[in-house]
Image (cartoon, rainbow, N blue to C red):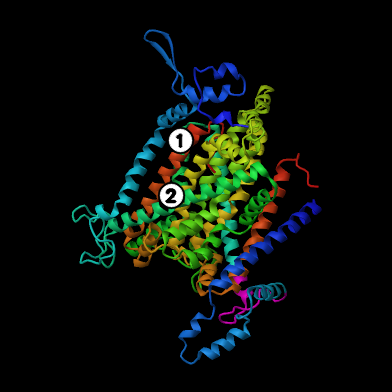
């Protein structure tokens, strides 16, 4: 049996008329974005899709807009650290222990062997941003796959998910991370990101599982089954798009969590060689009277995570209006 | 109730075994507790091999895990592989230090967090509410170790500049203090403040949200409609019901609080569980690492059990059977 539901909607060729009911919703959803209903000349009503409502809600969220602009500035600065940084991040210089000043471009001061902390912070941002974005990607991928299978099929994969979640309830994630990071992730952002991703997928998986459990009972899934769609197609073409909102929100907040964990691991000396956490640890080792070495990279972390959380809140309001606004 | 407790404890045994096996394999396969011996010029590689054999380091990982289980159950986690010291006395000492810190932080942060949450909810959108919201947002964004370090920087610099000793910024106690309690408070104040900031941010937000939900519920309207005074509505009807979701949250957050204590101890070089773990992990010896993990896992399980029992006390509809 051919899978008619997923052919492009044939507007105006009579398909709506010949096959009412089943195809109506899909065709309307597909066309709604572009339909302009003309009532009278000059008085036009544009039908708006769910996405355009979500977009409008997001752009109205003032804190989220501030957050996204700031975060883009910070991340672009990190990505182009090699071009922007006024000094070499590892090269000692004669300007030792300069407190933050605009005069010599030592905006964040220098450490006890004269390395410019502004340049080092820029490189630190680069490492942090690599790790956090990778973690969000990896964790979302694993979480969506396992959550979808566990919600849709149930059975052993569902068991695996729930038992893994139990495991992390008992053993603190930070301890597991440190054990693993000591042997696997040392110095490499990609490996550290893999580790964090392999640990943090459970949250997204639980969200996806919950949505799948309720959505698989819906009529449109039944309709897709009746028209002969395979399990894979139903899961990823029909159900998944309806769970995107909560996933995006969770992935955003996970980015913040990844940054916090990465900097903690690096601070404890089991992580990267040059990241914001390492810079703070270096600052502590250099002596507490050089306050800027600890303060400046730390403020950068706080700023990044504030932005990420604001964006997450904005996305939650935009994409997931049913969820209550509790930040726990 | 007793059967409930017994069943919960029984259920957690397989989880403990699985977690311990995974971690053991990980640590045992990837590190060598005798690594330091190679730099010792008095020992030949053959000598080290003999030592390794005596400690069963050349056995398969399953045998080693089984030996560890025996040691853990029969000999209080056995002796360190690296230097032969018994594991338990050291671990017991740091365990009590960490429990001391955690209990103080939990009590203080729940009291403060609940108070702020209630005030924010009954004066929603007031200046107090907005200030609390802003501060908690900043609290969420701050890594604990950084807040701890900033406190350390501030109080160290106060001491360096004016020779004013308000709080100590390292260690757990001084040698031969004059007033033991005062000395302990001066030492623990900064770690407690750093840890409380994080928890208070979470608890106050959570309390505010659940208070607001109860305040807008039908039975609160009923309570007001039948003419109860406001303090009675809030104190008796709203407050108690709002505490229920908070209890769950505190139990869930316990792991995060423990991780926070972990790094805070590291910053203030407190002789606690976090410090112990980092030293053990650096030495690559599976015995102290494993003992630490088991103790922490049992702590988490007990804590969750207590939270469940408190939950039943707050919500009489819940029956344990």
Q: Which of marks 1 and 2 is in front?
A: 2
**Residue A174 visible within the image:** yes
**Residue B163 visible within the image:** no
Looking at the image, residue A39 lies above or below residue A297: above
**Residue A38 place in picture, x, y as percent:** 43, 11
Report the disc number at residue A297.
none
Q: Is residue B90 magenta?
A: yes
Which type of secondary structure does the marked residue at label 1 adopt? helix
Q: Residue at x 46, y 48 (%)?
A: A255
In this view, the residue in front, B9 or A13, is: A13
Q: Give the range drawn in magenta.
A: B74-93
Magenta segment main secondary structure: loop
Which chain is home to disc 1? Answer: A
Report the disc number at residue A133.
2
Quarter of the figure with the C terminus of chain A:
top right
Q: Residue at x 23, y 59 (%)?
A: A87
Which image quadrant for residue B290?
Answer: bottom right
Evaluate if marks 1 and 2 touch, with contact meaning CB atoms under 8 Å apart. Answer: no
**Residue B46 place in picture, x, y as percent:** 54, 90
Q: Say which residue label 1 marks.
A: A314
Left or right, residue B172 beside residue B24: left
Crowding at mark 2 (Cα within 10 Å: few <14, some 14-19, many 20+) = some
**Residue B210 place in picture, x, y as percent:** 60, 37
Give the mark, 1 or 2, whose residue is nearer the N terminus: 2
Q: Which residue is drawn at 57% across and 28% down?
A: A5
Quarter of the figure with the N terminus of chain A:
top right
**Residue A20 place in picture, x, y as percent:** 61, 19
Left or right, residue A259 beside residue B54: left
């Amino acid at each position: 049996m051919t899978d008619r539901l997923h052919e492009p909607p044939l507007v105006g060729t009579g398909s709506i008329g010949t096959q009412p009911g089943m195809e109506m919703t899909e065709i309307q959803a597909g066309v709604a974005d572009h339909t302009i209903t003309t009532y009278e000349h000059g008085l036009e009503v544009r039908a708006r899709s769910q996405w355009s409502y979500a977009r409008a809600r997001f752009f109205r969220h003032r804190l989220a807009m501030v957050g996204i602009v700031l975060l883009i500035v910070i991340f672009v600065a990190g990505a182009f650290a090699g071009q922007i940084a006024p000094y070499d991040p590892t090269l000692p210089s004669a300007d030792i222990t300069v407190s933050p000043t605009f005069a010599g471009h030592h905006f964040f001061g220098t450490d006890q062997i004269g390395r410019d902390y502004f340049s080092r912070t820029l490189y630190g941002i680069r490492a942090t941003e690599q790790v956090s974005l990778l973690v969000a990607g990896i964790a979302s991928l694993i979480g969506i796959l396992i959550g979808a299978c566990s919600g849709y099929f149930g059975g052993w994969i569902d068991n695996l998910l729930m038992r893994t979640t139990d495991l992390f309830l008992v053993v603190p994630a930070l301890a597991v991370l440190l054990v693993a990071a000591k042997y696997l992730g040392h110095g490499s952002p990609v490996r550290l990101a893999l580790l964090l991703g392999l640990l943090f997928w459970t949250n997204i998986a639980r969200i996806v599982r919950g949505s799948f459990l309720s959505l698989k009972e819906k009529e449109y899934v039944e309709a897709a089954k009746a028209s002969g769609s395979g399990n894979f197609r139903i899961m990823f073409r029909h159900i998944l798009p309806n769970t995107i909102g909560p996933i995006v929100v969770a992935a955003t907040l996970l980015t913040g969590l990844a940054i916090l964990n990465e900097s903690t691991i690096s601070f404890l000396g089991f992580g990267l060689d040059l990241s914001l956490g390492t810079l703070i640890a270096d600052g502590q080792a250099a002596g507490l009277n050089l306050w800027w070495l600890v303060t400046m990279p730390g403020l950068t972390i706080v700023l990044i995570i504030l932005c990420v959380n604001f964006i997450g809140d904005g996305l939650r309001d935009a994409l997931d209006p049913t969820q209550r606004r509790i930040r726990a | 109730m007793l059967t409930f407790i017994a069943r919960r404890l029984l259920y957690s045994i397989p989880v403990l075994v699985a977690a311990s096996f995974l971690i053991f394999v990980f640590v045992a396969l990837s590190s060598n507790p005798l690594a330091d011996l190679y730099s010792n010029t008095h020992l030949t590689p053959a000598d080290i091999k003999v030592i390794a054999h005596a400690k069963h380091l050349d056995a398969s990982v399953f045998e080693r895990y089984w030996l560890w289980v025996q040691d853990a159950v029969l000999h209080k986690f056995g002796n360190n592989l690296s230097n032969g010291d018994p594991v338990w006395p050291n671990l017991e000492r740091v365990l009590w230090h960490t429990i001391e810190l955690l209990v103080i932080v939990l009590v203080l942060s729940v009291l403060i967090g609940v108070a702020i949450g209630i005030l924010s909810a009954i004066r929603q959108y007031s200046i107090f509410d907005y200030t609390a919201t802003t501060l908690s947002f900043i609290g969420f964004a701050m890594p604990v170790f950084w807040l701890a370090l900033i406190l350390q920087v501030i109080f160290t610099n106060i001491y360096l500049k004016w020779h004013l000793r308000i709080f100590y910024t390292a260690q757990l106690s001084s040698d031969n203090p004059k007033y033991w309690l005062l000395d302990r408070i001066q030492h623990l104040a900064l770690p407690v403040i750093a840890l409380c900031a994080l928890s208070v941010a979470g608890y106050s937000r959570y309390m505010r949200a659940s208070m607001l939900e109860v305040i807008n519920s039908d039975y609160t309207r009923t309570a007001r409609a039948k003419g109860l005074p406001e303090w009675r509505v809030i104190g008796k009807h709203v407050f108690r019901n709002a505490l229920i979701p908070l209890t769950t949250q505190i139990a869930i957050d316990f792991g995060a609080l423990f991780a926070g204590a972990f790094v805070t101890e590291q910053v203030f070089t407190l002789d606690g569980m976090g410090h112990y773990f980092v030293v053990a992990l650096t030495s690559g010896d599976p015995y102290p690492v494993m003992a630490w993990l088991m103790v922490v896992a049992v702590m988490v399980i007990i804590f969750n059990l207590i939270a469940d029992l408190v939950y039943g006390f707050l919500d009489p509809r819940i029956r344990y059977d």
